Image: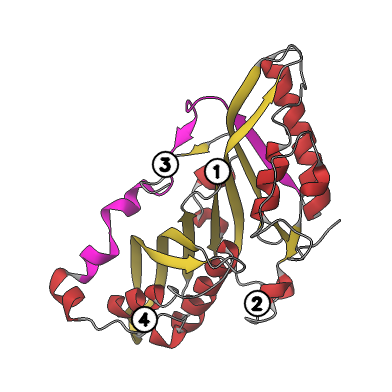
Amino acid sequence: MPDFNLQNSSLGKIAPTPGKYDASLLYRIPRSDHRIKYQIHLSKLSFTGVDVWNCYELSFMTDNGLPVSGILKLIYSAESQYIIESKSLKLYLSSFNMERIGSTIVNAGKNILRIIEADLEKLLETTVSLSFFTNNENEKQAFPEFYQKNLYDLIGEDNLYSMKINTFEETPELLYGELSNNMHEYVFHTDVLRSNCSVTNQPDWGDVFFKMQTKYVVDLKSVLAYLVSFRKEQHFHEDVAEMLYKSFFEAFQPKQLMIAIRYTRRGGIDINPIRASHIDLIDVAFTNPQILLTKTFRQ
């Protein structure tokens, strides 16, 4: 099974639309490539989590040539050894455009899920959960209460404009808090996160949903400065989520910690990694394949 290699992959290159179904288009990337660098070890992860991909451009045909279009939701564990290279997934899904794979829309939908599940589980060597949606009947917004707690609002206008932000490369030392005797809870949403693709250096925009319980009194201005410090960083989406988690975990020794990132759609696909200290902190809209995640404002 091919691991990611820039020279052999289509990332950053002109690629024709596939004319027929082709599983060989898929590439995987070892998570260890990033985790070794940032001292995140699979054998002793401090988090659980999933990566959720929403693919908005899946289309195929019934046996009589009737087009079927919808949204594919796929989920796999953060404990898997590999992630999918996103452009390879786009091209792979495009390879179904002219395929006739079922006598009815329902049968064709079931058949394509079986094919994709088998191909992705072989590629990633882990369980993959899939659903295909042709309408938004089962749509649900994740973390709806977080939208009322915008990080800018929590910091306050006067404090925001008194800040001097000059660090645009990831710097966890920016995080600051004072240890206390009491437990404090921090919950917020923000859309300030911007990082860049590891290969193409094209910008990726993310909405962060954050929850933490800690005995530290956290300076939220330092949190904002740290998030902004990713602005020139080049990383895959999943790596950014784990870097954020690791930095907050080490800085504030939390009792509970959850970081979810809803990345803006690129190439018809958005990637939504979530990392948490406890599984019950993860919204069911992420983990249940039968629920379609409501798009954020920017998605």
Cα separation, mark 1 vs mark 2, equals 30 Å
Q: Earlier in the sequence, mark 4 or mark 2?
A: 2
Q: Is residue 212 visible?
A: yes
Q: Residue at x 50, y 77 (%)?
A: 249
Q: Which residue is mark 4?
A: 216
Local SS, label 4: strand
Q: Are marks 1 and 2 in contact (CB under 8 Å)?
A: no
Cα separation, mark 4 vs mark 2, equals 23 Å
Disc 1 residue crowd, few under 14, some 14–19, many 20+, Cα 10 Å: some
Q: Earlier in the sequence, mark 3 or mark 1?
A: 3
Q: Which mark is residue 40?
A: 2
Q: Which residue is mark 3?
A: 141
Please tell me whether residue 224 belongs to the stretch shown in magenta: no
Cα separation, mark 3 vs mark 1, equals 20 Å
Left or right: 116, with 157 as reference point:
right
Disc 3 residue crowd, few under 14, some 14–19, many 20+, Cα 10 Å: some
Cα separation, mark 1 vs mark 4, equals 40 Å
Is 188 in front, or is 44?
188
What range of the chain is rendered magenta?
Answer: 127-155
Is 144 in front, or is 23?
23
Q: Which residue is mark 1?
A: 268
| Mark closer to the observer (1, 4) | 1
Q: Residue 214 appears at what percent x and percent y?
A: 40, 75
Q: Residue 167 appears at what percent x and percent y?
A: 38, 84
Q: Residue at x 52, y 50 (%)?
A: 266
* Image vertical order of residue 284 relative to residue 201, above or below: above
Q: Earlier in the sequence, mark 1 or mark 4?
A: 4
Local SS, label 2: loop
Q: Residue 77 appears at what percent x and percent y?
A: 67, 55
Q: Amino acid at mark 2?
A: Ile
Hey, which residue is sitting farthest left in the picture?
A: 158
